[in-house]
Image (cartoon, rainbow, N blue to C red):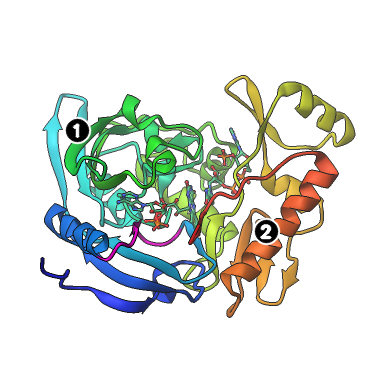
């Protein structure tokens, strides 16, 4: 068996995670196609090590070195694979960067991804946590994907139903040791069907004097809003929202509302989704800093690395916030990024 061509031992992952924290992978390699992926998985098996998949590293927190063979998915390519009068099915390889993919689709007149502009990471990771923003989730535009089933070694196609998408969740996330996504297919529209229900988008379009917005206009205002609130990971290390918005029973929400009349919450599948950022902000954590780990000054849901924080520093801060929110509001906050090496 030959070793993967790009294999590197004790590889620093600092350039490969948007928190910018330092940790080494025992082995790091890349896979641009299924043959390279199989080769990397065989190498891991031969060395009795777990294999793990990395995309753009924008949803991971590294708290220690990884005793694994880490495989970065690098396959590229975007194709239209089917077309009807109203829709196109667009297939993109796992290693395509998400935002340039969204922009490419808009340029081609393939619509539906505009609200998901400027999310970092790769196409291959997009279904893993069913990425979502501004009222749209991947599941709304998803057609199917091709994945390697590590249990059987077979390439399989997973449909929308099989992916079991939920709020920041999917079967790929639940069974992370099993699936490697190679390519994803999206069902996009040839004519615009804009999703403007999410308050700030409509307000921003109105402020621009945009009365008949195009999908490009929506993408542009989403980029503007995001850039004004969220730290750019190339400037200030972060992994986006650090906690999921907690979903609580209506009765619990009503108790909270009686105590905190301004609590921000939205109906979610018969329950209430609380804005975790509001809870953290109200508890006084916004802008808080401990060494080089901190809570972003514009968005309390985002934890940041001011420079030389270790993953453990960021995790320790997150745990303090979790304990405080539990104690104040009786609400438990679940960490959204993947904390590795767990
Ligand atoms: P990685 O961080 O590399 O990996 C994430 C997980 O997916 C890991 O478990 C990894 O093993 C797995 N994975 C990666 N590729 C594959 C593959 N090909 N096959 C199988 N498993 C794979 N998320 C949102 O949902 N909405 C947002 O609006 C949003 N905004 C963000 C803003 C900022 C500034 C940042 C830094 C992050 C934001 N995120 C957001 C989180 C993150 O960008 C997304 O979750 C993104 O999809 C992660 O992609 P990635 O390629 O970086 O994945
Ligand atoms: P925001 O607009 O300040 O809103 C705060 C929270 O309220 C959001 O988390 C959102 O939940 C919820 N919300 C607001 N308007 C809503 C509506 N009309 N219907 C239902 N829920 C509503 O949030 P933000 O932090 O600036 O983020 C904007 C969008 O980008 C959000 O969708 C957010 O999820 C997404 N985002 C995600 C990440 C990440 O890493 N996961 C990072 C940055 C931004 P939802 O989160 O469920 O939408």
Q: Position of residue 208 (x, y in %)?
A: 51, 48
Q: Distance between the residues labelled 1 and 2?
A: 42 Å
Looking at the image, which is closer to me, 60 or 98?
Answer: 60
Looking at the image, which is closer to me, 121 or 71?
Answer: 71
For the magenta stretch, what is the residue range?
47-58
Q: Position of residue 122 (x, y in %)?
A: 33, 55
Would residue 13 appear left or right of 145 to someone viewing this image?
A: right
The residue most toward the right is 259
Quarter occupied by residue 313:
bottom right
The residue most toward the top is 270
Mark identifier at residue 318 = 2
Split into quadrants, the picture shows ligand 2 in the one at top right
Residue 331 vertical position relative to residue 8 in the rendered view, above or below: above
Figure disc tally: 2
Quarter occupied by residue 217:
top left
Label 1 secondary element? strand
Residue 268 vertical position relative to residue 227 in the rendered view, above or below: above
Crowdedness near tag 1: few (<14), some (14–19) or many (≥20) residues, C-alpha within 10 Å: many
Q: In which quarter of the image is the N terminus?
A: bottom left
The answer to whether residue 95 is visible is: yes
Would residue 21 appear left or right of 328 to someone viewing this image?
A: left
Instruction: Tell me the chief SS of the magenta region.
Output: loop
Which numbered disc flags the more N-terminal residue, 1 or 2?
Answer: 1
Kindly check if marks 1 and 2 are in contact, taking CB atoms under 8 A apart as contact.
no
Mark identifier at residue 333 = none
Tell me the residue that label 1 is attached to: 88
Quarter occupied by residue 10:
bottom left
């Amino acid at each position: 068996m030959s070793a993967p061509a790009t294999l590197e031992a004790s590889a620093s992952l600092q350039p490969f995670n948007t928190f910018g924290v330092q940790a080494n992978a025992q082995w790091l390699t890349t896979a641009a196609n299924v043959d390279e992926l199989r080769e990397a998985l065989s190498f891991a098996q031969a060395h009795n090590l777990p294999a793990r998949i990395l995309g753009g590293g924008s949803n991971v927190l590294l708290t220690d070195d990884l005793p694994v063979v880490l495989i970065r998915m690098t396959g590229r390519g975007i194709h239209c694979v089917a077309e009807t009068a109203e829709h196109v099915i667009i297939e993109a390889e796992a290693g395509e960067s998400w935002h340039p993919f969204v922009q490419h689709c808009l340029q081609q007149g393939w619509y539906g991804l505009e609200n998901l502009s400027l999310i970092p990471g790769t196409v291959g990771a997009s279904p893993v946590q069913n990425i979502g923003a501004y009222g749209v989730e991947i599941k709304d535009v998803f057609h199917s994907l091709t994945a390697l089933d590590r249990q059987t070694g077979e390439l399989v196609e997973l449909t929308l139903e099989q992916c079991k998408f939920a709020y920041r969740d999917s079967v790929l996330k639940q069974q992370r040791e099993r699936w490697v996504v190679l390519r994803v297919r999206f069902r996009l529209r040839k004519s615009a069907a804009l999703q403007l229900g999410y308050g700030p988008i409509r307000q921003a379009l109105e402020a621009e004097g945009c009365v008949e917005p195009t999908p490009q206009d929506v993408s542009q205002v989403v980029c503007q809003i995001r850039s004004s609130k969220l730290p750019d990971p190339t400037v200030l290390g972060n992994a986006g929202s650090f906690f999921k918005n907690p979903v609580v029973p209506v009765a619990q929400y009503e108790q909270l509302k009686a105590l905190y009349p301004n609590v921000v919450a939205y109906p979610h599948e018969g329950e209430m989704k609380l804005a975790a950022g509001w809870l953290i902000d109200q508890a006084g954590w916004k802008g808080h800093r401990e060494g080089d780990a901190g809570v972003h000054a514009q968005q309390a849901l985002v934890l940041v690395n001011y420079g030389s924080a270790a993953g453990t520093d960021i995790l320790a801060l997150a745990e303090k916030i979790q304990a405080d929110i539990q104690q104040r509001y009786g609400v438990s906050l679940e960490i959204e990024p993947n904390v590795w090496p767990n």
